[in-house]
Image: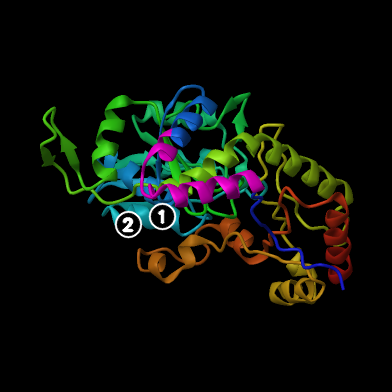
Amino acid sequence: TLNYLPFTKPTLDEATIQGVVEVLRSGWLATGPNVQALEKALSEYLGGRIVRTLTSATGGLEVALQVCGIGPGDEVITPAMSFAATPNVILRVGAKPVFVDVDLASRNIDLNRVEAAITPRTKAIMPVHFAGLPVDMDALYDLARRHKLRVIEDAAHAIGSAWKGKKIGSFGDIVSFSFHPNKNMTTIEGGALSFADAEDVKKFDLLRFHGISRDADGNMDVSVAGGKYNLSDVAARVGVGQLPLLDGFNAKRRELVAHYFRHFASDPACLLPARGDEGHSWHMFAPLLPLDQLNISRKQFVDAMHQRGLGVGIHYPALHLFSLYREQGYREGDFPNAERIGRETVTLPLFPTMELADVERVCAATKEIIE
């Protein structure tokens, strides 16, 4: 039997594993020198921006909203198709997520529809760079400037992606990255925020660790009810090993995806995701199945792939159809593209240690099952 091919897996080298062992032996396990080293390396990678690590990208988004002063009575515009974390953090700070439909090919928020969703209560836009494909940054920031809105970029998928040659997170307002094991680089669990404004960083530093500050004599004060989002040194050491390999990982992803596009033939045709330029880090490869023309369900497709030793993910169901968001007044039919993606999407195997032959195997199986 052929080896099982998961839809994703992290690439951890021996030097990083040994580095983690050294941290464990050092006795300094919580935030320490490795966190500082990772923040410095990320800052350099992003052209000198101020970068702070934390326990997750979800925590990053939530604290970013607090840094921007967003809370009860405020609205934040966000795409109707993303991971649940994106709108959940808006609710968690007491604000209202306002969904906008996404583009069918790019899967990114349809910026042409954002303007109509802006009200006097709108304080921010929280776009998602889906699968590492950047949203149109010129249009996004032009819109934000005209309406005086903050932008919190959910760049969970986009570490190493670039817009017109400039890395996502090297410019813009506040940008949140994820280093979960299925992302393009990992710290096991973890994330980072990239900031434009030093005043925002001061607020963040208080919120990251219990609101604690110290004076010159080391006396402690607490001025805000901060949370606890500090990354461990063990996790950071994984990131320190991963970051120098990231551009190589992403280059391999682009090579694998180019092979997918060469070999992906099926009739009826799947709708393939939009292709960015060389700045697309290809976190995932997620075509839409032509379910209206097939006599099988998506579950049957996924099961048939599993039987052939091929892992498949689903990214993502439409957000507004979850119970939590139906309670906010959203209904079926509100966002047709998000709903279609939610019904038809499948995430096919893509990770840096795959071979081109693995891509051919996935394409052949997809074609066979569809036919």
Amino acid at circle 1? Pro
CB within 8 Å, label 2 to label 1: yes
- Residue 278: tell me if it is visible: yes
User: Which secondary structure, mark 1?
Assistant: helix
Residue 311 or residue 173, whichever sits in front:
311
Give residue 229's position: percent from left, percent from top.
33, 49
| Type of amino acid under label 2 | Leu
Q: Quadrant of the C terminus?
A: bottom right
Which residue carries the number 1 mark?
Answer: 87
- In the figure, is residue 211 to the left or right of 133? left
Q: Nearer the viewer, residue 30 or 70?
A: 30
Residue holding disc 2:
91
Vertical order, 121 against 188 (above or below): above
- Asked if residue 179 can be seen in this view, the reply is no
What secondary structure prevails in the magenta region? Answer: helix
Task: Work out which residue is located at the far front of the displayed protein and give it.
Answer: 25
Q: Is residue 177 left or right of residue 66?
A: right
**Occupied quadrant, residue 363:** bottom right
Image position, residue 272 (x, y; %): 75, 51
Give the residue drawn at x 58%, y 40%.
241
The reply, left or right, for residue 366 in relation to residue 143 is right
Q: Relative to the observer, which residue lies in front, 194 or 136?
A: 194
Q: Could you tell me residue 97's position as x and y percent?
A: 37, 53
Secondary element at tag 2: helix
Residue ID at (58%, 48%): 18
> What residue appears at the point 38 percent right and 58 percent down from the top-left corner?
88
Q: How many marks?
A: 2
Q: Position of residue 29 (x, y in %)?
A: 39, 50
- Give the magenta range: 13-36
